[in-house]
Amino acid sequence: MSLTGIRYTKGFLLDLRRRLEFVKDAHELLEMKRDQLIIKLKEGLERFKEFRRKVEDEAEEVYRELSLLHSILGSADLKTYSAYLRGRMEVKIVPRGVIGIVTPMVRVVDIPDYTNLYPPQIIPLAEKVSALMKDLVKLAELEAYIENLAEDLRKTNIRVNALEKVVIPNYEETIKKIQDILDDEMLEEIIRLKLIKEILMRRRIT
Amino acid sequence: MITYLICKCHAYESRLLPRKLILELASVPRLEDFIEILSTTIYGQRISEAKNVWDIEVALTEIFIDRLSTLLKISPENIREFLVQYYRRFEVQNMIRIMRMKLAHESMESVEEIIIPSQRLGGMDLDPFVKARNFNEFISLLAGTMYKRISEMEIENPLILESMFRWIYYRGVFDKISKIPRDDRSDVMEILGVELDLHNLRVWILPMLYKYDRSLAENLLIDNPAGKSKRLLMEMKSVEELLEGFPRYRSFIEMLMRREEWRAEIEYFKILKDEVDKRRISKYVNFFYVLKYILDCEVEYRNLRLITISLYHNLPINVRRSLLILPRT
C-alpha cells in the first residue's frame, strides 16, 4: 500500500509524522487487545474442554440409564412414559459484550417440570435429562463465545499485521523519502545562496 | 381338576429355559446369535422369523400370553375365575398405556402396537379404548366397565388415575381369593401383599427423595389388606423409618435411596421370586404352585426381553448378566 497525494513540503512531513505516531499508538493498542484476546481464548478453551467433558459424561450417563430402563421396562412402557412430558424448554438469547465483542448469552426461561408428574421409574432419568439440557445450552453459549472470540482475534491479528508490515513501513518510507527530498532541496538552497554570495562578493571587488 | 392344573404346571415348568441357558443367552455378543440359540428352544420358529428388536419383543409377549392362556383352558371354573381376575394386571397395564398414549395424542396405530393381547386372558375387548378419539372419550368409555369409578372422578393428574386402575385391580383380586383352595389363600394373599408393599414403598419415597407433594403420594398409595396398611406407612416420615419398618425390603429401599429405579425394578421381581420360591417345596401340589409357574413365566419373559434390548444397546456382558432376574444363590 502506498500513500497518495504526497506533497514534499515541511508541513506535510510534520503531518505524516503525527499520523505515524497515531498509527503506532493504534498498533500498540491492537497488540494489547490481541494479547488479551489470546488470554481470554485460552481460558475459554480450557473452560470449554472441561465443560464439554462434563457434558459428554452426563450424556453418556443419560444414555446408559436410558438403555438400562429400556432393557428392564421394555419398549412399550418406555414409549408411553414420554407421554407425561408437559411444556417445552424455553430459552432467551441476549447479547453480552466481552472486551468489545458481542456474544450471545442464553438464559433458560422455562424448563418442563417433572415433579408430581412422572411415575417413580422414570424420575431419575428425567432429572438427569433435565440437567443435561441445561448444560447443553450452557455449552452452546460457551461455544458461541469462543467462536466470536476467535473470529475477533483473527480480525485483530490481520489488523496488527497490516499495521506492522504494511502501513507503518509505508509511512516510514514516505517520511524518509520526503525528508531526503527536503534535505536535498535545503542543500541545494544553501549551495545556491553560497554561489550568489560569491558572485556578489566578486562584483564588489571589481 | 385342580390337581390336573397343578400337574400340568409341573410339566410346563420343564419347558422353561434353564438358568444356564439364560446366562448363556446373556453372554452372546450379537442379537443374531441370541436369535440362533433361542430358535433351537421352545421359542423356535416365532423367534427365528424376527427381524429386529421390536419383532422379538412382540414374539416374546405372544409366547408369554400363550403360556398364561393355556392355564385358563385347563382350569376348573372357580380357579379360572380367580386367574382371569389375576391376569387383569395385564389389562390394567394396557389401560394405563392407552391412557398415556391418548394423553400424548398418539395415533391409533401406535397405540395398537403397544398393546399386550390381554383379551386372550379373559380380559375385556380393548378395541373401543384403542379407537377412542381422545383422552376424554377414553375416560367416558370406562363407564361401562369395572373401571367405571375412574370415569366418575374429576382428576387431572394421570398418576392418580394409574393408581386408581391398580387399586380397582387389587380390590378385584382380593375379592376373588375365596375362589382358590383355602390352604393357599394366605400364601396368595401374602404374595399380593408383598407386591403392594413394594408399590406403596416406591410411592411413599417420592416426597422424601423427589419433593413430590405428600398429599399426591397419599392418593397414590393402595390399600393393602395383606401387608403394611396405608395408615401405618403414612406415619413414616423418613427413609430411616422406612428401613426400620420394612427390614425385609431393605435392599429395595436402598436402591430407591440411591435413585437406581432401574435396579429397584429388578429387585422388585427378585423379592417376589424369593417369596414364591420359599414356598416351593411345601406348596408342591397346591394351587400356589400355579402362581409360582405364572411368575416364572413372567420372569423368563422379562429376562429374554431384557437380553434382547441390552444386546441392541450393546451393554457389556457383566451388566447384562447383572440385570437378570435370577433366584439368589
Image (spheres, coloured by chain):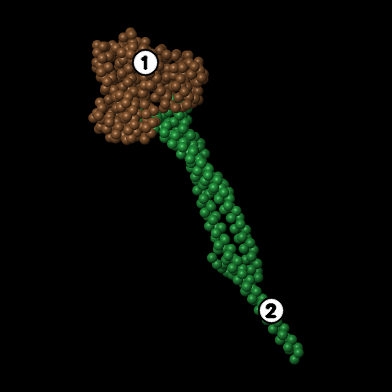
Q: Indicate the chain on which mark 2 is placed.
A: A
Chain of the residue under label 1? B
Instruction: Count neighbours of disc 1 (C-alpha within 10 A) and say few if under 14, some if 14 to 19, many if 20 or more.
Output: few
In the picture of the structure, the residue carrying the numbered disc 1 is B278
- What is the quadrant of the N terminus of chain A in the image? bottom right
Spot the residue most to the top: B182
Residue A9: quadrant of the picture? bottom right
For the point 60% across and 53% down, which residue is it? A32
Element under label 2?
helix
Contact (CB < 8 A) between labels 2 and 1? no
Closer-to-camera residue (A57/B233):
A57
Image spot of residue A62 (x, y percent): 43, 34
Image quarter of residue B201: top left
Q: Secondary structure at mark 1?
A: helix
Residue B195: give its label: none
* Amino acid type for the residue under numbered disc 1: Lys
Crowding at label 2, few (<14), some or many (≥20) Cα neighbours within 10 Å? Answer: few
From the image, which quarter does the C terminus of chain A lie in?
bottom right
Q: Amino acid at mark 2?
A: Ile
Which residue matches tag 2?
A190
Residue B25 locus on image (x, y percent): 32, 30
Tell me which residue sits at (42%, 32%) in the image: A65
Q: Residue at x 30, y 12 (%)?
A: B286
Q: Nearer the viewer, residue A202 or B312?
A: B312
Chain A: what color?
green
Residue A83, image x, y percentages: 39, 30
Residue A96, above or below B90: below
